[in-house]
Amino acid sequence: MAVAEGTLVDELRQNLPAERVLWRDYDLMLYEYDGSIDKHRPLAVVFPLSSTEVSQVVKLCNRYGVPYTARGAGTGLSGGAIPARGGVLISLARMTRILEIDVDNMRAIVEPGVVNLRLGQAMAQYGLTYVPDPSSQKACTIGGNVGENSGGPHTLRYGVTTNHTLGLEVVLPDGEIVHVGGNSSDSLGYDLVGLIVGSEGTLGVVTKVWVRLVPINETVKTILAVFGNMEDASSAVAGMIAQRIVPAAIEMMDNLTIRAIESRSPSGYPVDAQGVVLIEVDGLREEVDAQAPAVDEVCRHSGALSVRLARDEAERAALWAGRKGAFAAIGRLTPDYYTVDGVVPRTKLPATLARIQQISAESGFRIANVFHAGDGNLHPLILWDADIPGSEERVIDTGAEIMQVCAEAGGSLSGEHGIGMEKKDLMPLIFSQHDVAQMQRIKEAFDPDGLCNPGKVFPTAGRCMELFARRGRAAGW
């Protein structure tokens, strides 16, 4: 295989300019990880600038039987862009053009390397915006968002990436370039766009994205509710939805997170609060003027110590900067942190948070909680130190136990970060063998040779039971 791999690298360098092919170990080290805990080094990294170049690379990989993995900005949190079985890493980070803006039909066509925030900024001059806004939106790319079906704070009301993706250009595993969907909001036949969005790069490489744009709202109000405990904060979230109040965003943070944020960059959060809920309402002025007092009333009824409306755009921006910088702020408190991404029904939030607190005490790891409370999407951050022997295995076990709590509450293993390498062996917590077998049939139909981002999503036989056996718990098929 070494000879074949060396020949493949030579051919890659013949097909692409030398500066767009990395193959030396020193350069490859930078591409062996993403934002998750796993690592694996590729054989080579290539930087195509077009779908034709992507197709050429895929066809070369097919010829040599070498796996390949697409990568965006490397901000993923589940190992989706890690080359689990080596091979070629196809970086789409240089495909950064906004190809077309159709203001009248509120559509745009973009390449996968366009940074999420840049797309929103480019549309502002037309009075339009792109809604999905992950916390990493300053760095993450539209292609990566499509791969993971990313969400963000403002998708409570407006939906996640799949709800704002109209069409895709995809290089299939045999190298063929195809289009699915397009400018129309409705397409006949099977929903292939919906199938590929969230497939974590296992069905092909996305090279163009048709996105839906929406008008910038007339009025926005941001509200901060402060609570003496997380149970009351959770009750306020459930109370809003029960009252049929659906804000654009409902975010929740605990005291550990608040203190981390304020120590990094003061944003206006009270450091003695045990929990805060950040709520944003938007829309027509009359609608917002009616919703804001209703939100205030629900929060106070749920035991809020204070409820305040951001006075101006500067205060609103500061509150959101603190929330979106929360993960980075946690880095001030610990050498390493492990991000868990799960979902529970909103009514199960208080019990789930209480159980996470118990898991923290049992494991010895501090756990900070910051999450999209409106749709029950939890992001417990487990604080740990990779230099302590055995700590990686323990922190993975702790994350798995939190995932089991989410599953038992009737929730899901991921709200937006995907399954990837990190949670593939936890799939049996919510899917039967038949469910997974049906998914594998789809994968095999697209990728019969199994070279397109292998080692992701699908569980390793027996691994789920092994994970929980270490903690004396029963789980698995």
Image (spheres, rainbow, N blue to C red):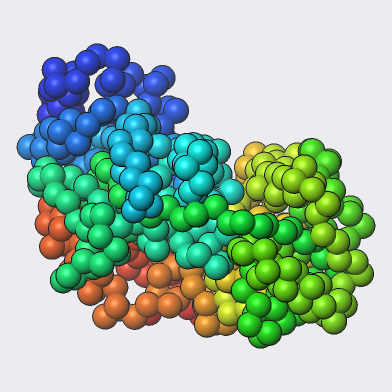
Q: Taking 316 as reference, is 143 left or right? A: left
**Pick the front one: 352 or 110:** 110
Q: Position of residue 277 (x, y in %)?
A: 76, 64
Image quarter of the C terminus:
bottom left
Picture quadrant where residue 136 is located: top right
Q: Residue at x 25, y 60 (%)?
A: 184
Q: Is residue 362 visible?
A: no
Residue 236 lies, in percent from the top left, at 76, 77
Up the image or down, 80 lies above or below 119; here it is: below
Image quadrant of residue 359?
bottom right
**Residue 34 position (above or below residue 367):** above
Placement of 1 over or under 466, stated as above or below:
above
Classify the position of the N terminus by image quarter. top left
Residue 457 drawn at (x, y percent): 35, 60
Q: Residue furthest left?
A: 63
**Front-most of 346 and 421?**
346
Q: Position of residue 264 (x, y in %)?
A: 79, 38
